[in-house]
Amino acid sequence: MTDNTTLLVGPFNRVEGDLELRLDVQHGRVAAAYANSPLFRGFERIMEGKGPMDALTIVPRICGICSISQSMAAAMALADFAGKTPSPDGAKVAQLLHMVENVSDHLMHFNLFFMPDFARPVYADRPWHGRAVERFTAAKGSALKRATEARAGLLHIVGLLGGKWPHTLAIQPGGVTRAPSARDKVRLSADLAAFRSYLEEVMFGAPLERFLELETLDQVSGWETGDVALFLSIAQDLSLEGSGLGSGRYLSFGAYPSPNGTVFERGTLVDGFSGPLHPEQIVEEISHSWMLGEAAHPSKGMTRPDEEMRDEAYSWCKAPRLAGLTYETGALARQAIDGHPLAKALAREGSVRARVLGRVLELARTQVEMERLLASIDPRAPFMRHVKLPSDGEGVGLVEAARGALGHWMRVEGGRVTSYQIIAPTTWNFSPRDERGVPGPVEAALVGAPVRAGEDTPISVQHIVRSFDPCMVCTVH
């Protein structure tokens, strides 16, 4: 490899959808990165002219692994449009469905998307490699079998309460269509108990509460049981705490909203300091996107593809900014903004290791919250309220998908949708440069990544990209 070269990396395996990276490499390290979302799908265009309730059928099909997140955002936008709130216990069931999907995503990311990279021959000389091969070799590792079995058992909850997964229609602006009985609660409790057993036996190797008591980086580095310990030993050996460093800016729309508030708080975190979230300050920039129009707040914006694909642009993804700045979103952001001490310490680190541990921490915390939430559901309560939609107006639905902040902005005129704009988590994290030339979060995190001679797809780059857990089919809808 010469001192200065350009690599085109992609498509990536074990990434949902299509992703390409252009890397400018100087002296064996990434000097600049450009993330391209090469597939435009146009769900925002599909929604134009449809009845507003059609959103519940159409937009969940943006994605097959986070469809409940899309359902939740659409149902919330419809409720906001109607000026109504769902029934309290209906909201709890919707929360539980959403939690199950997000936990399922985290489990699959750790076991099937992220950890298999360490079973590659490039790491054959490392002391942990044999264990990684046995646990995480694609399609063969013992950890993969246990994880998929545990996930299938957890998704029984969605089958019982949602009828099917993905693309359930159980979540509505007024609540949910399935009222669980007392007998159902017993079955659901057994499903949650089985999943806890898996987490404590395999992932953590100890009671979840022990892991949740950890507050410092030194404490988590000393964790010695379960697959989490294997990851930590790998991370220490490869110095993943210094890889893929972020900007230190995080945002969360608040996870699992209900009439009584959110389970995990909304807000921002900048250089360790918490602050409020002002969604009205969001602007989608398009200077480096193959889009027509002008930068605008999503309630005023449009999605019109530039069929000529002008030269100064390089992605179908827009560039969302909050008050003109890039923000990272995801499980690490959620847990740090919610105030967990370990998550706040990890957010200050802002590395590959931190993002993975953020998901691990959220797995444990969400399991506890699912158990609490199920216990609070009253089978005698109403689970649905009648919601009549007006013929004109606007609605907003802000939720947290597994990968971070997801927003739906709807405008209706004469009973028909005239605008439906969506910003997905990966739109935030994998955005292109803005009009000031500031790179998006993953583009900035890739700067400095080592590239060895002969590497067409640098392993360090793959670790950084997968630490963000991109869902590219959501990115440009």
Image: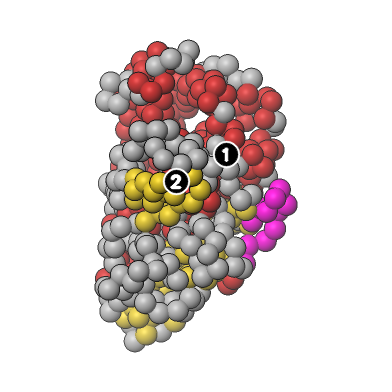
The verdict on residue 226 being magenta is no
Disc 2 residue crowd, few under 14, some 14–19, many 20+, Cα 10 Å: few
288 and 300: which is toward the camera: 288
Left or right, residue 408 beside residue 16? right
Note whether 268 is above or below 14 in the view shown. below
Residue 351's disc is 1
Q: Which of the two discs, 1 and 2, labels the residue nearer the N terminus?
A: 2
119 and 169: which is toward the camera: 119
- The image shows residue 191 at horizontal and vertical percentages of 40, 31
Left or right, residue 8 beside residue 208? left
Is residue 181 visible in the rendered structure shown here? no
- Circle 2 SS class: strand
**Which residue in the rendered view is the most extreme toward the bottom?**
414
Which quarter of the image is occupied by the N terminus?
top left
8 and 240: which is toward the camera: 8
- The image shows residue 365 at horizontal and vertical percentages of 56, 36
- Circle 1 SS class: loop
Rendered residue at 45%/71% (across/down): 287
Rendered residue at 30%/76% (across/down): 48
Residue 4's disc is 2
- The image shows residue 474 at horizontal and vertical percentages of 36, 56
Note whether 248 is above or below 70 in the view shown. above
The amino acid pointed to by label 2 is Asn
In whole angstroms, how far apart are the C-alphas of marks 1 and 2? Answer: 26 Å
Magenta range: 268-278
